[in-house]
Image (spheres, rainbow, N blue to C red):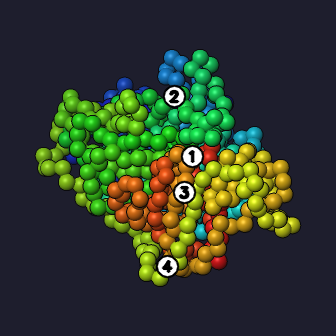
Amino acid sequence: MFAVQNDGLHGCPMPQRRFSRRSLLGGGLAVAGVAALCGRGQARTAGLPPRLRAAAQGERRLSLVAAERRAKLLGADGPDSAVWTYGEKLFEVVRIAQGETLAVELENRLAEHTAIHWHGLRIPNDQDGVPYVTQPPVRPGERHSYRFTPPDTGTFWFHPHCDTVAQLGRGLAGVLIVEGDETAPYDADLALLLKDWRLDPASGGYLPFMTQRGALRAGTFGTVRTVNGETAPRLTVRAGGDVRLRLLNLDSTRVGDIGVDGGEAAVIAIDGNPIAPFPLKDWRLGPAMRLDLVVRAPAAGGEVRLMDYFAAEPVVLATLAGAWAPARGKAFDPTPLTRSAIPEPRIRGAERLTFAFATASKQKSALAVSADDGDPLAAALLDSLCAASTVNWSINREAWPVGDHSRVPKPLAVLREGRTYVAELSNETPHVHPIHLHGFTFKVLGSTKRELPVHFADTVLLTPNERITIAFVADRPGDWMIHCHLIEHQETGMMGYLKVV
Ligand SMILES: [Cu+2]
């Protein structure tokens, strides 16, 4: 059993000079072990870990070993907790450049099968990481390779797709940053990973990840809120600098209402997709969603706080503390990021789809077509890790079935490759549902309830009784999952798939 390093982003003295782009991106600003290194007088500060070493021209190799390790999630004096991770860090943060190929070797040292879904990446269906649907599960002791070239820049993540409530609940997730969108260098570039843990504070052990009460309502919340594995970390940044914050909601349940207190902040990307910068007031960040911000760091000795305003009592997620010589005196005016070439939906003449997200009635949940012999989906439904544990929720009156019968769902829709689809996502419940479509980056066109900027995303939050219209080009064939990313909803029926042929 290994102890993992929390990605503590505690600041330490940074060299008294302006960072060049090269020093920012070149890997000198390692995060891991920052606190230990500071005491020896080495200059380190908050930042992303180094890039992977190039294995060959244009290729980066990544080795991930899914295993149980130990981590300090309840503070230095608290008991250890067992976490499931892909490596020696609590969350692996992987950086590659746009155009590079990522070659991943996953080894499963867990006691149950797993796989890796690459959330938000527009990659071929056979690399999408959904057991039985796009690949066989990776059994304990087995290895599996992934190889793909992410087409888009941005802030992405990866996680398992069966028994997610327990595997992600124990921390099995990582971050993939595809670089190449910057038009001007930032003074710091930080990934902030938001995740709660269902821990018993006395023992450090886990409370049940799923409860019937939670699964039927807004989900079962964690007891310990962390950012990069720490409670309300304090990050030292250059006074007056422009700090890129990549926020990732890796939690299974928690919806944040993200704001910044004490300084200026602008939204520059949503789910990794650049958007014309606009001032951050507050932004609902549901499970699996990402938000890239630029925040103007405070003057030396000052503080800017990253807040969650969702609860009646606002929560400080992290504090940026200004230090050292001021970086720049210019007014706060973030430059837009460079956009990737996401296919533009052609709305005129597009085919219309509707997806209703609702509770499941008992009769409706049994509405499924008979299994074909040899259909891999039939196998999925006999595997308790991948079938629904019970049925509470549905999409278009169909629920992802439970494992005690041999019926498989048909696709929610069959789409023609290359065509544009406009889909209305309709929340017929009094609960929030962060809806994720695999494989496609869709354009959010509008909401019946909220002012939303038109933006590209892979996950969109449906608030109670809200309808949101999205559009996308179905440009790659395969079976693509669509589901709620509130994991207890996903695992109790709110999941289906679209077949693109
Ligand atoms: Cu949901």
Circle 2: element type: strand
Residue 446: x %, y % from top left: 40, 63
- Above-or-below relation of 223 to 107: above
Q: Is mark 2 within 8 Å of ligand 1?
A: no
Marks 4 and 1, Cα distance to the nearest angstrom? Answer: 30 Å
* Residue linked to disc 1: 486
**Tag nearer the camera, 3 or 4:** 4
**Tag nearer the camera, 1 or 2:** 1
Amino acid carrying mark 4 in the image: Ala
* Residue linked to disc 4: 350
Q: Does the residue labelled 1 lie within 8 Å of ligand 1?
A: yes
* Residue linked to disc 3: 436
Q: Earlier in the sequence, mark 3 or mark 1?
A: 3
Circle 3: element type: strand
Marks 2 and 3, Cα distance to the nearest angstrom? Answer: 25 Å
Q: Does the residue labelled 3 lie within 8 Å of ligand 1?
A: no
Q: Do the residues labelled 1 and 2 touch (CB within 8 Å)?
A: no
Circle 4: element type: loop
Circle 1: element type: loop
Q: Do the residues labelled 3 and 1 touch (CB within 8 Å)?
A: no
The numbered disc on residue 224 is 2
Residue 331: x %, y % from top left: 14, 50
Amino acid carrying mark 1 in the image: Leu
Q: Are marks 4 and 2 in contact (CB under 8 Å)?
A: no
Residue at image x 60%, y 79%? 416
